[in-house]
């Protein structure tokens, strides 16, 4: 059986008109003799509205109920797609996660798909039906509804492609591929024909919203090739695949892409009493409360007694972090400072492994635009800097041109 998995994101099913367009795309694959499995997101804005409603009830809305609530959006979009296909004379039906069922593991809000029962869907495909499956949701071993993180329908699609061993997994979205940087933020961004899982993982983890980071990890682990395409225009998209498949890296660019974040906060502890184990004492209670610490700098103490420690966290965790640090009896410091006006800008590319001087070029080009770097972090294939939010656009533009991505 020649199976294709098609995923439609929020804007691609955002109106009845868009749903009709999505149905046309689905039908085009049926006509090419594919058995089509569709994974759909909620219509755009629906999930956000549900999240807002939960926040109005409580800042600590119970996570299990949150999952039931926010997964409701997909229950609306899937039957609309199925209905449109039936209207056009095709056999189709919607499937919620518990009907498949799609099993997940892990905590509510951030579960991961561990198994998909194939039997019923296979039977349905064989009978000529087009299953329209709700993305983003699953059920856990206690039969409770779970969700797999915002933007999770990408991961649902990839796991369906894995379990059904599909020939293709196509992510239909509102841009026609993965670009060197967000094309809605920089006009000169260029579409990439192909990108490796590793680079894509860095791009998305560092802020490129086009795919959910976990989904790219799932694709890499399971060797699922992904095509990112537009549901608006019929154009070739971007292939995300393993490095080995990228033989013709004709561009020979050192940097593949640039990402930026919008939801970071910087925390500085001034005048911390320096002693072995101090960093651990600060970070242990944060990790126990599931607060992810990202970039860290600790200055060498000038007097050997006190030091300053700076780190970044997600903006959403700021209040919790303040509370935890202020209540931490194991540390001594003079002042606690916070900055919400920061953004992390990162350059990503396997080319930097073999090319010296990339760090210098990045820093110099930001300096040329008088952009101050607050914190730096690096890995083998990325360099990130924390800067003031107001300079993000300028920084991306400068770096895009410095590393010849405009061409
Ligand atoms: P969907 O609803 O289809 O899942 P998303 O809004 O999650 O779509 O992702 C698509 C958006 O990702 C685009 O509209 C674009 O603004 C943004 N984006 C950020 N970085 C990139 C990039 N490097 N390439 C393409 N799109 C990007
Ligand atoms: N509807 C969910 C969200 O908005 C899942 C998705 O769109 O992939 O996060
Ligand atoms: Mg998305």
Image: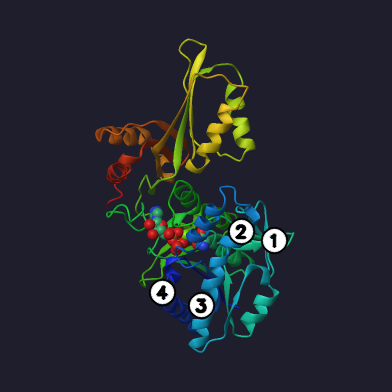
Q: Nearer the viewer, residue 297 or 242?
A: 297
Q: Residue at x 37, y 44 (%)?
A: 254
Residue 295, x across and y down, in percent: 48, 34
> Are the residues tagged 2 and 1 within 8 Å (C-beta)?
yes
Residue 80, x across and y down, in percent: 51, 77
Residue marked by disc 1: 144
How far, Cα to Cα, is label 4 from label 1?
32 Å
Mark closer to the chain start, 4 or 3:
4
Residue marked by disc 2: 67
> Are the residues tagged 4 and 1 within 8 Å (C-beta)?
no
Residue 28 visible in the picture: yes
Mark closer to the chain start, 4 or 1:
4
Residue marked by disc 4: 18
Residue marked by disc 3: 80
How far, Cα to Cα, is label 4 from label 2?
26 Å
Left or right: 351 as drawn, with respect to 371: right
Q: Quadrant of the N terminus?
A: bottom right
């Amino acid at each position: 059986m020649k199976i294709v998995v098609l995923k439609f994101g929020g804007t691609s099913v955002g109106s009845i008109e868009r749903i009709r367009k999505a149905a046309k795309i689905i039908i085009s694959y049926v006509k090419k003799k594919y058995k089509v499995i569709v994974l759909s997101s909620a219509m755009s804005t629906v999930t956000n509205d549900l999240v807002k409603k939960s926040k109005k009830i409580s800042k600590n809305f119970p996570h299990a109920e949150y999952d039931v609530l926010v997964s409701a959006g997909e229950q609306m979009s899937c039957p609309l797609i199925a209905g449109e296909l039936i209207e056009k004379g095709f056999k189709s039906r919607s499937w919620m996660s518990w009907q498949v069922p799609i099993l997940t593991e892990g905590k509510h809000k951030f579960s991961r798909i561990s198994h998909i029962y194939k039997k019923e869907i296979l039977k349905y495909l064989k009978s000529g039906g087009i299953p329209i499956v709700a993305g983003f949701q699953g059920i856990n071993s206690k039969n409770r509804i779970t969700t797999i993180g915002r933007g999770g329908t990408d991961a649902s699609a990839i796991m369906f492609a894995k379990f059904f061993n599909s020939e293709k997994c196509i992510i239909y979205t509102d841009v026609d591929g993965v670009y060197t940087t967000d094309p809605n933020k920089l006009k000169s961004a260029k579409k990439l024909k192909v990108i490796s899982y590793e680079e894509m993982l860095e791009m998305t983890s560092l802020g490129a919203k086009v795919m959910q980071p976990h989904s790219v990890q799932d694709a890499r682990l399971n060797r699922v090739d992904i095509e990112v395409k537009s549901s608006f225009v019929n154009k070739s998209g971007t292939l995300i695949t393993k490095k080995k498949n990228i033989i013709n890296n004709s561009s020979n660019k050192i940097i593949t892409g640039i990402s930026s974040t919008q939801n970071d906060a910087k925390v500085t502890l001034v005048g911390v009493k320096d002693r072995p184990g101090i960093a651990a004492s600060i970070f242990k209670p944060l990790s126990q409360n599931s607060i992810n610490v990202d970039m860290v700098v600790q200055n060498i103490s000038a007097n050997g007694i006190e030091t300053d420690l700076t780190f970044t966290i997600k903006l959403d965790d700021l209040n919790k972090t303040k509370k935890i640090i202020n209540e931490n009896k194991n540390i001594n410091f003079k002042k606690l400072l916070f900055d919400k006006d920061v953004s992390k800008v990162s350059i990503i590319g396997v080319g930097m492994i073999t090319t010296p001087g990339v760090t210098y070029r990045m820093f110099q080009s930001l300096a040329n635009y008088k952009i101050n770097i607050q914190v730096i972090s690096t890995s083998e294939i990325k360099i990130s800097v924390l800067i003031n939010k107001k300079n993000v656009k300028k920084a991306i533009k400068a770096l895009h041109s410095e590393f010849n991505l405009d061409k």
